[in-house]
Amino acid sequence: MDPGETLQQLFAGKTVAEQKALLAQLERAGAAVYRHLAESESDPAKKEALLAAAGREDENAGVLDAQLAD
């Protein structure tokens, strides 16, 4: 099964609020993966790019959290 199909199954049958909450969790998990990859990266530019990507994932999660708080 490809990742897209897996995500479709994860979101199936959930309300919009539940989908946003799940996506926020997945964004944070993605951030953690980027940070883990950055830990083993010896090239400073690549490391910084990975950490920046992690930050964007955290920002995405924050957008979703803010919408859920409304």
Image: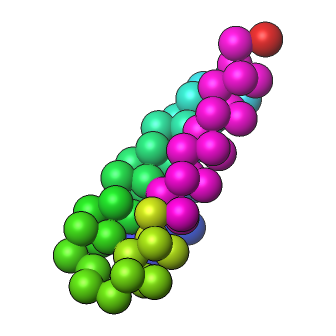
Which residue is depicted at the point 45% across and 44% down?
A: 28
Vertically, is 34 above or below 70?
below
Which residue sits at x=47%, y=38%? 25
> Where's residue 63, x and y in %?
71, 35
**Quadrant in which the N terminus appears:** bottom left
Locate residue 2, reporting x and y percent.
46, 75
In this rendering, does residue 57 appear at all? Answer: yes
The correct choice, above or below, for 64 with respect to 57 in the image is: above
Q: How is the image coloured?
A: rainbow
Toward which corner of the image does residue 50 lie, by quadrant? bottom left
Of residues 30 and 12, the one nearer the viewer is: 30
Along the viewing direction, whichever of 12 and 63 lies nearer the viewer: 63
Residue 28 drawn above or below residue 56:
above
User: Residue 62: within the magenta?
Assistant: yes
Q: Count the marks.
A: 0
Q: Is residue 59 magenta?
A: yes
Which stretch is magenta?
52-69
Q: Residue at x 54, y 63 (%)?
A: 52
Residue 15 visible in the displayed image:
no
Residue drawn at (64%, 25%), measured in percent from left and top? 65
Q: Residue 13: image x %, image y %?
A: 61, 34
Where residue 70 appears, as percent x and y from the top left, is 78, 11
Q: Where 5 sits versus 66, above or below? A: below
